Amino acid sequence: NISPFENDTIYALSSGASKAGIAVIRISGPGCLEVYKCLCPEKPLLKPRYAAVRTLLEPGSINAAEANIVDSDSLVLYFPAPKTVTGEDVLELHIHGGSATVKAVLAAIAKCSPSGKIRYAEPGEFTKRSFLNGRLDLAQVESLGETLAAETEHQRRAAVRGSSGVLGKTYEGWREQLLLARGEIEALIDFSEDQHFDESPAELLTNVTRLVNDILNSIQMHKLGSQRSELLRNGIRIALLGPPNVGKSSLMNQIVGREASIVSAEAGTTRDIIEASLDIRGYLCSFADTAGIRTGESDKIYNLDQGLTSLIGTIEREGIRRARQKALDSDVVIVLASIERNASGGHCISYDRETLQLAAAAPHRLVAVNKTDIVDQESLKRLIEDFKTSALKHVEGFQDSEPLTLSCKAAAARVAGLADPGGVHTLIEKLVQSFSNLTSLPGDMQHLLGVTERQCQLLSECQRHLEDFIHETRLGGAPGEGEPDVVLAAEHLRLAANQLAAITGRGDSGDVEEVLGVIFEKFCVGK
Ligand code: GDP
Ligand code: ZN
């Protein structure tokens, strides 16, 4: 037991703070049995891991007279150390959920004052003790933190990936291999030539280099996993681009109204960017509805009947600049165009060529034509074909695109009898397909979604030292390059191993306390 809190017994409400039928209070530390005896005097000791029904009494009272009862029919469980969630003795009280009852039981526990100290737990303190007592490695603790913070289904799934301990074991394995290799290389240095080795120095270096390269390749995959899960954690950025009036705001309203729930929203002015965090089928997305992207040159709406015509007057430069930046920063870009009536009484498709070009840079892009309700099927078909041959075909990234057709108006009216009035549902399907592509990993690598940002940074550091090692041992290959410095090479292995130790919090990574501070900040009390 390396717990620096020594004899403190801690307690906290571990179930949610909102109203529920049952509340769970967890107590951890050497004073558990004393707390039990104090709340349930003259009751038999608890059989470990078995639930018992007990009446909890005011500390100091001698009988179960009504006045002395704090809570009746509580379920009480005792888990003796060390195979418990914290590695210490744990007592769980499942009591009635009302806030007055919770308050009274917590107050009663505080009065039990077992030998040593009893106090309310700090945020994350139960988990911290689990870590310090070797019940969880740091990677698992982090994953638990992510699980508690998860707001959407895919965030939850990614978080759970890290909880199995597989990642921690992998890094621990690499660390041991690197330290072993370092030891072998140092043995080469320390002993003279007449010493017999199984491998020649050249063989040994070749083998270690192979090991290092294998680990470097794996690190690459782990970093990819982290990047992909970062999309799940921080949200997939979607930009909705197109000239004014094509229906961007209407589309956003339809998406929010039908298929997504708002996590948070920040409204701007009409010409500004409106951002909303949405939960679309379990994916966290930050949605930006932008002002139409325009410059002096391309302030044009393509009119199938009249050719290129400049139609737009005043433009807010700042809004445009920001919209363009948004497009470049996005994971998915939706380019919206619309069918409009033109002066001669016909119809045309209003779109912005520059927007299409910008969108080509995004990892995923969709193009959709809105307001299909204002033309008949025949004309729609013709307009879409014309749009493809005269516009999409000329923009890289859209050559083979089949534009989606939308009618936000029909979607808003929820035309009866149509499964997908207005096509919004189909658009969402396409989006979710993109999300899945952006965040998926090969089947046997799904667990790499559990690699956190902190771990990714440490892996990058580790990678750097391993590359230094490779560089150092390669020296001497070319004339004028100097001899490989084996001492230095071995030191790079040690430094690389240290980064891995910092991931799991085991080994001599030094600033474990600092790491703990960062991780446990996120935790709430009772965990
Ligand atoms: P934004 O400037 O791109 O955000 O476009 P808005 O969403 O503000 O829509 C501009 C105008 O087009 C509004 O008057 C909408 O009512 C109208 N509009 C939007 N979607 C449709 C549609 O599917 N069909 C028709 N007929 N009008 C639409
Ligand atoms: Zn708008």
Image: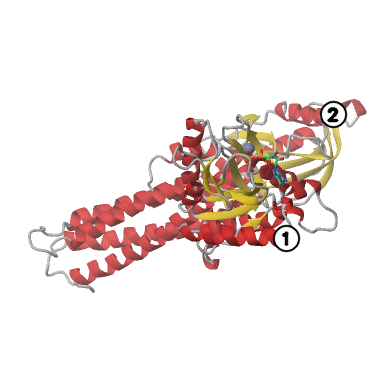
Please state which amino acid type lies under the numbered disc 1: Gln
Residue 272 placement: quadrant = top right
In the rendered view, tell whether residue 192 sits above or below residue 53: below
Find residue 62 and name its label.
2
Residue 118 placement: quadrant = top right
Q: Is residue 145 left or right of residue 79?
A: left
Q: Is residue 139 visible?
A: yes
Q: Residues within 10 Å of mark 1 (few under 14, many from 20)?
A: few
Q: Secondary structure at mark 2?
A: loop
Q: Quadrant of the C terminus?
A: top right
Which of 144/67 is in front? 144
Q: Residues within 10 Å of mark 2 (few under 14, many from 20)?
A: few
Q: Secondary structure at mark 1?
A: helix
Whichever of labels 1 and 2 marks the residue nearer the N terminus, that label is 2
Count of all numbered marks drawn on residues in the image: 2
Please state which amino acid type lies under the numbered disc 2: Ile
Extreme-front residue of the structure: 344
Q: Quadrant of ligand 2?
A: top right
Which residue is tagged 1?
377
